[in-house]
Image: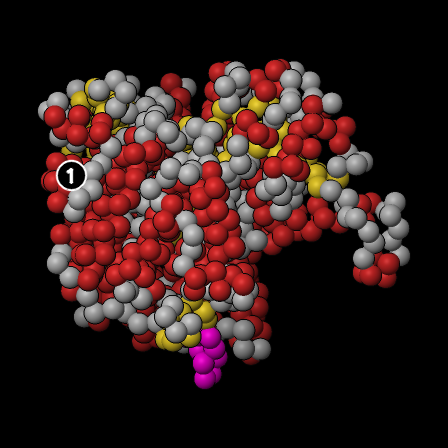
């Protein structure tokens, strides 16, 4: 159903308010961003000749907040165009404009009295039907709207976004006892499908779900560290990826959040949850309190649990606090056998299970933290949220855990873990033992119709709740769902006449480089799909679509001077990417995350694209001394020409745009910016929610099929040839002599110029698509033989960073 929300207002332009406004604008919605009028003119205002009536003075606070959002890194906005959707104003001059908005989000300072004043004033101009919400991170809903009318309360709820708003998936919804169900549904639908958020339903309790568990986890970790005599860097080595948590682990995350903010959340739990098991830990250790008093608040002050120091030559050295002495020392990697073992384990459940079972400093600390966290989570069910799913999702989406607490417990083995807890003298919540006594062995299980989760209230399993549009490939691949597969590819039946080509790397799943088996898979799957299906989607549900081709294979062949094998490899990849659009059925690609080099070429090879909003696309081959050779130059030229009248003979700006994009290895910071660069066309779509991307791509592919899809006709190009290449080479020469680029940069970019200008041609001679592919292949082979290119490839493989030689 279409959303009734057309325009949104955000009250407060601090980090959270401006971030919320930016992301609403990213979703395409006009936003009114308001903040207070400054209390008085500053010296700078007077120097500028401003008065108290000047708009520049009256909007100074909101302007500063907005500008901070435009400069934020990582970026808050998708691109500059989305910034224009935000209108700035202040609480005095523009308050009446709130009556024109369908949803008003309060994000003012985290003080109950101020929020109460805002809502009392807002109600005077509020009209029934307008939704009002607060972005409080832990204040009581009931207290905030005390004294407000029933109609106002019926349209009020808490919408707790996480920072940074654009990138953090979690959106906690806290309805009040009077909140209308349709209001909760409207915001949940809007949050999921318009903003791309993961929705968790929380109760009106201090710190809600994610922060209630997260704050306990940090507090308990501090307590365990001091009681068990561990050091900060030792603890972070244990509580990071080894335990299924982010690389920032416990203390790195605390520095990022800010120690003052951390102690505020401790105080919220300490004062608001008097019977909480974490009470002994919610008063931070004395050394932490002294850090806050000294202004060592984390990254925002330059020092916290960690501090970065410049060494000789400007090199950065990371220092860590020795909490016993209060002095900083160089960070060290602890010599713990279990950490070395689990570093090689990709599966999160197996990794956590292995670490918790180890009888060394890593295993003992991990077990204590896991034990206490799991017991704590079990006792919060019914208090902070009614479902295990919401608690697990809150920790995965809000704290970037690989597995939520109950998913972790399943990985450890519920019964075995409970016995180990009891041996330590600790009991989980009663409902856990009731579940086990009834014969259930895990919190989650695979039911006949999909995944199920234990409902402690009902004492039975129930389906894991999710929208019908959230398709899961691994579930679709069960039974007869896999039509064909090899070691790098699967053709999966999506139902309704559509199939999905899934390409995954077993050895490097995170970056998913394209290898020979995947390329073979593209061609085989296309052949099968053309005879057995009406439409095809190219997608998988890993971390990144693909960060490029298999550089190791290229390096090995170049070192062996096996030019024929390299030529055959490139020709095969070109054949695979160009075959997508030549197929008799529509092919829709659905990239996400990194889509670099070959990943970008694969994305552009289809008839249409449904890119996730967070798609970082670019043809980056020049960074390793190569050129795009999977059709990338061809596809980019086609896309930049798509909006121009043909034949194009008098305007070669599209060639310059393509050259700049490729020669500078530009990578988009969003799908919207990928469209600005030419990687997406006006006919391609952007999906805000990763979970719905496959469904959206399937729907588009089937729509094309229903409309009588036929493959596009062969295209030729009118390119400037040597004349255009010479102009580009002159630009490169000037950049070289002014030391902006190296000699080898000039060589590589010169090859790019030759390809994009059509080689040995003139503007009045059409250049075929195949001729451009031939030029790509020729340049790629030539550069593979260059020693400096081989040095760049080797350096990238060893360090993960480009070499400028």
Please name the colour scheme applied to the rendered image: secondary structure
Residue 679 in picture, x, y percent from top left: 47, 45
Name the element at disc 1. Answer: helix
**Residue drawn at 74 percent across, 23 percent down:** 125
* Residue at image mark 1: 418
Foreground pick, 783 / 114: 114
| 316 within the magenta span | yes
Residue 546 in picture, x, y percent from top left: 32, 49
Q: Is residue 278 left or right of residue 30?
A: left
Q: How many marks?
A: 1
Q: Which quadrant of the rendered structure holds the C terminus?
A: bottom left
Q: Is residue 718 left or right of residue 212?
A: right
The answer to whether residue 503 of the structure is visible from this angle is no
Position of 479 relative to 607 (above/below): above
Q: Is residue 67 left or right of residue 523?
A: right
The answer to whether residue 296 of the structure is visible from this angle is yes
- The span picked out in magenta is 309-318
Foreground pick, 663 / 253: 253
- Quadrant housing residue 320: bottom left
Residue 672 in picture, x, y percent from top left: 52, 42
Foreground pick, 223 / 47: 223
**Residue drawn at 69 percent across, 23 percent down:** 123
């Amino acid at each position: 159903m279409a959303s009734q929300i057309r325009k949104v207002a955000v009250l407060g332009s601090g980090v959270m308010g401006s971030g919320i406004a930016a992301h609403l604008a990213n979703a395409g919605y006009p936003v009114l961003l308001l903040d207070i009028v400054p209390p008085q003119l500053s010296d700078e205002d007077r120097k500028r000749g401003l008065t108290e009536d000047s708009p520049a003075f009256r909007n100074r606070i909101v302007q500063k907040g907005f500008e901070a959002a435009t400069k934020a890194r990582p970026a808050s906005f998708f691109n500059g165009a989305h910034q224009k959707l935000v209108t700035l104003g202040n609480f005095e001059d523009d308050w009446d404009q709130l009556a024109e908005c369908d949803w008003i989000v309060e994000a003012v300072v985290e003080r109950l009295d101020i929020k109460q004043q805002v809502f009392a004033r807002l109600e005077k101009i509020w009209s029934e039907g307008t939704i009002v919400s607060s972005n409080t991170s832990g204040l009581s809903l009931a207290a905030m709207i005390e004294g407000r009318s029933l109609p106002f309360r019926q349209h009020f709820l808490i919408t707790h976004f996480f920072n940074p708003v654009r990138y953090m998936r979690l959106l906690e919804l806290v309805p009040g006892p009077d909140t209308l169900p349709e209001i909760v549904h409207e915001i949940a639908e809007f949050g999921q499908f318009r903003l791309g958020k993961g929705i968790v339903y929380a109760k009106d309790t201090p710190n809600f779900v994610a922060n209630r568990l997260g704050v306990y986890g940090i507090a308990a970790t501090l307590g365990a560290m001091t009681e068990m005599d561990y050091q900060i860097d030792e603890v972070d080595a244990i509580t990071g990826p080894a335990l299924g948590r982010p690389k920032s682990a416990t203390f790195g995350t605390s520095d990022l959040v800010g120690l003052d903010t951390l102690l505020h959340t401790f105080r919220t739990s300490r004062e608001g949850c008097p019977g909480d098991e974490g009470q002994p830990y919610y008063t931070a250790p004395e050394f932490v309190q002294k850090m806050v008093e000294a202004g060592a608040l984390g990254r925002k002050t330059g020092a916290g649990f960690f501090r970065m120091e410049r060494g000789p030559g400007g090199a950065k050295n990371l220092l860590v606090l020795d909490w016993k002495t209060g002095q900083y020392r160089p960070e060290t990697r602890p010599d713990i056998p279990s950490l070395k073992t689990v570093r090689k384990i990709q599966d999160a459940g197996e990794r956590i299970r292995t670490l918790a079972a180890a009888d060394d400093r890593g295993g003992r600390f991990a077990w204590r933290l896991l034990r206490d966290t799991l017991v704590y989570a079990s006792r919060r069910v019914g208090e902070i949220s009614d479902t295990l799913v919401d608690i697990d999702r809150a920790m995965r989406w809000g704290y970037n855990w690989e597995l939520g607490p109950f998913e972790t417990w399943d990985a450890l083995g519920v019964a075995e873990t409970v016995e180990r807890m009891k041996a330590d003298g600790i009991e989980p919540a009663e409902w856990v033992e009731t579940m086990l006594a009834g014969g259930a062995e895990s919190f989650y299980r695979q039911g006949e119709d999909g995944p199920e989760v234990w409902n402690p209230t009902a004492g039975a399993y129930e389906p894991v709740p999710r929208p019908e549009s959230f398709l899961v490939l691994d579930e679709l691949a069960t039974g007869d769902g896999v039509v064909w597969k090899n070691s790098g590819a699967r053709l999966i039946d999506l139902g309704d006449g559509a199939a999905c080509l899934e390409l995954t790397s077993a050895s490097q799943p995170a970056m998913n480089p394209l290898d020979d088996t995947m390329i073979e898979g593209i061609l085989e799957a296309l052949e099968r799909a053309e005879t057995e299906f009406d439409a095809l989607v190219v997608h998988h549900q890993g971390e990144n679509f693909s960060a490029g081709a298999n550089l190791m294979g290229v390096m090995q062949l170049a070192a062996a001077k096996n030019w024929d094998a390299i030529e055959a490899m490139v020709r095969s990849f070109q054949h695979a990417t160009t075959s997508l659009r030549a197929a008799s059925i529509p092919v829709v690609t659905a990239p996400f995350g990194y889509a670099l080099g070959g990943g970008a070429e694969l994305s552009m090879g289809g008839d249409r694209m449904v890119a996730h909003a967070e798609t970082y696309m670019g043809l980056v081959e020049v960074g390793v001394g190569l050129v795009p050779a999977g059709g990338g130059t061809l596809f980019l030229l086609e896309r930049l020409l798509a909006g121009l009248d043909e034949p194009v003979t008098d305007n070669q700006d599209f060639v310059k745009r393509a050259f700049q994009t490729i020669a500078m290895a530009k990578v988009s910071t969003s799908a919207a910016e990928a469209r600005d660069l030419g990687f997406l066309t006006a006919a391609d779509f952007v999906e805000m929610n990763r979970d719905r991307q496959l469904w959206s791509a399937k729907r588009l592919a089937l729509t094309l099929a229903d409309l009588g899809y036929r493959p596009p006709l062969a295209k030729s190009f009118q390119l400037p040839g040597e004349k255009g290449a010479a102009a580009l080479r002159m630009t490169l020469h000037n950049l070289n002599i002014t030391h902006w680029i190296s000699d080898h940069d000039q060589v590589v970019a010169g090859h790019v110029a030759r390809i994009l200008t059509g080689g040995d041609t003139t503007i009045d001679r059409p250049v075929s698509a195949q001729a451009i592919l031939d030029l790509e292949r020729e340049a790629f082979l030539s550069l593979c033989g260059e020693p400096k290119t081989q040095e760049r490839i080797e350096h990238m493989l060893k360090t993960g960073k480009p070499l400028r030689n």
